Amino acid sequence: MTRARSVRFATGVVLWLAAAAAATVVGMFAVGAIGADIFGPDQQPLSQSQVDQQLAQTTTPHPTTSAPPPATSSTPPPRTTTPPLAPVTPVTSDGGTVLARCVPGGVQVVGSTPAQGFQVDSGDDGIDDHPSVKFRSGDREVEVRLRCVGGRIVPEIRTK
């Protein structure tokens, strides 16, 4: 009787080890498949400066050059170039992240993303000299107020 029990126990251990090995292989394959999305091209995590640079590239339109219709004279028409926009600055709080940049006239809120469990309660659109974005989760409220000082975003975060 004890021999049969030992064989069943050993069989159970072997089957459990095989299942654990299979789960590990599947997990490693899944992580490898999504690794390119969460890591840089050399499979290393991105640094904060690399993240900032990629954010600025994806949210900042490229400067455009426009020319008026051709003139009838032989002199070439003047070309105008729009100045590049200021870089986008991420401001992180317990309630979420706000993306903003300094622009003539104040601060432009580019976007906001609530943290898990929070919702964007209200936010300023357009350009304002002191915009704010509020994140809410139940009775908890996190307000992110922004100002532009010396060409840099200066946040003030209040939690209620």
Image (cartoon, helix red, strand yellow):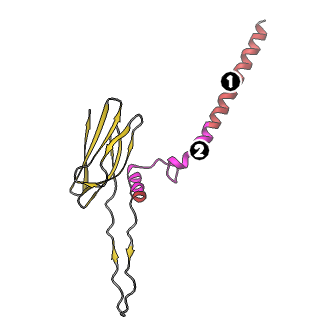
Q: How many marks?
A: 2
Up the image or down, 114 lies above or below 137; here it is below
Quarter residue 103 falls in: bottom left
Q: Which residue is mark 1?
A: 16
At mark 1, the secondary structure is helix
Residue 143 location, x and y as percent?
Answer: 28, 40
Which region of the structure is painted magenta? 27-55
Q: Residues within 10 Å of mark 2 (few under 14, many from 20)?
A: few
- The answer to whether 11 appears left or right of 143 in the picture is right
Q: Say what amino acid the circle numbered 2 marks.
A: Gly
In the picture of the structure, the residue carrying the numbered disc 2 is: 32
Q: Position of residue 155 (x, y in %)?
A: 25, 46
Of residues 31 and 43, which is closer to you in this image?
A: 31
Q: At label 1, which amino acid type do we have? A: Trp
Which residue appears at 35% of the width and 93% of the height? 73
Secondary structure mainly formed by the magenta segment: helix
Is-magenta flag for residue 31? yes
Front residue of 77/86: it is 77
Q: CA distance from mark 2 to mark 1?
A: 24 Å
